Image (cartoon, grey):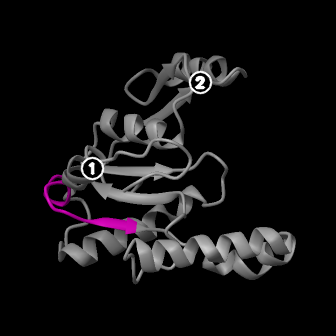
Amino acid sequence: QQRSTTFTWEIIVVDDGSNDTTADIVQTYVAKYGTDHIRLLSYKKNQGKGFAVQQGMLHARGHLVLFADADGASEITCLDRLEQAMFGALGIDDRNDYAQCGQSFCITIGSRAHLQQRAEAERTVLRNILMHGFHFVVKWVGNVHGISDTQCGFKLFTRRSVIRTVLLQRIRRWCFDP
């Protein structure tokens, strides 16, 4: 982040009962960059993606908190677009004023819509039917309108929005709220 001297960052990895070498790999980065930048939350028992996301978000220390899936479906370089959309939605002109931004309520959600055609071509017919059925349920039963990709694992929250939404989360498995 070159435009701001106030910008700080941290990466929180939540190891939710994995039996691979995730924790060991993260510890090598902790040793290299320190706990101000890299933190590992490790749980013995798998409690689900929703739980892992909730814990990571609640342990984050910044004015802005990015939730990013580890699968790399969204490039970290797109963070600037989420941040720009957030500052614009809040009417904050100074892109270095993270503290003011963090005190407001705002969530910006990334989108993988540009990858949709290729992804649908690579999925089985059954998977596409299930995906469209899930989107229908989210939209009409969950009353979620105006968000093209609710499942995109690339969302930027203000600190205040994390507290307001993540503390209310009840579902902890692969499909989680908010």
**Residue bearing the label numbered 2:** 26
How far across and down, in percent of the image, does residue 53 sit?
45, 42
Is residue 30 in view from this perspective?
yes
51 within the magenta span? no
Q: Residue at x 32, y 57 (%)?
A: 157
Q: Residue at x 61, y 20 (%)?
A: 23
Q: Nearer the viewer, mark 1 or mark 2?
A: 1
Q: Of helix, strand and loop, which one carries label 1? A: helix
Type of the residue with mark 2: Val
- Judged left or right of residue 31, residue 54 is left
Q: Is the C terminus in the top left, top right, bottom left or bottom right quadrant? A: bottom left
Q: Are marks 1 and 2 in contact (CB under 8 Å)?
A: no
Above or below for 109 versus 39: below
Nearer to us in this view, 130 or 92? 130
Q: Residue at x 31, y 48 (%)?
A: 7
Q: Of helix, strand and loop, which one carries label 2? A: helix
Quadrant of the image occupied by residue 45: top right
How far across and down, in percent of the image, does residue 158 sit?
26, 56
10 Å neighbourhood of mark 1: few (<14), some, or many (≥20)?
Answer: many
Is residue 112 in view from this perspective?
no
Q: Which mark is residue 162?
A: 1
- Judged left or right of residue 123, residue 156 is left
Nearer to us in this view, 146 or 47? 47
Q: Which residues are magenta?
A: 99-108
Type of the residue with mark 1: Val
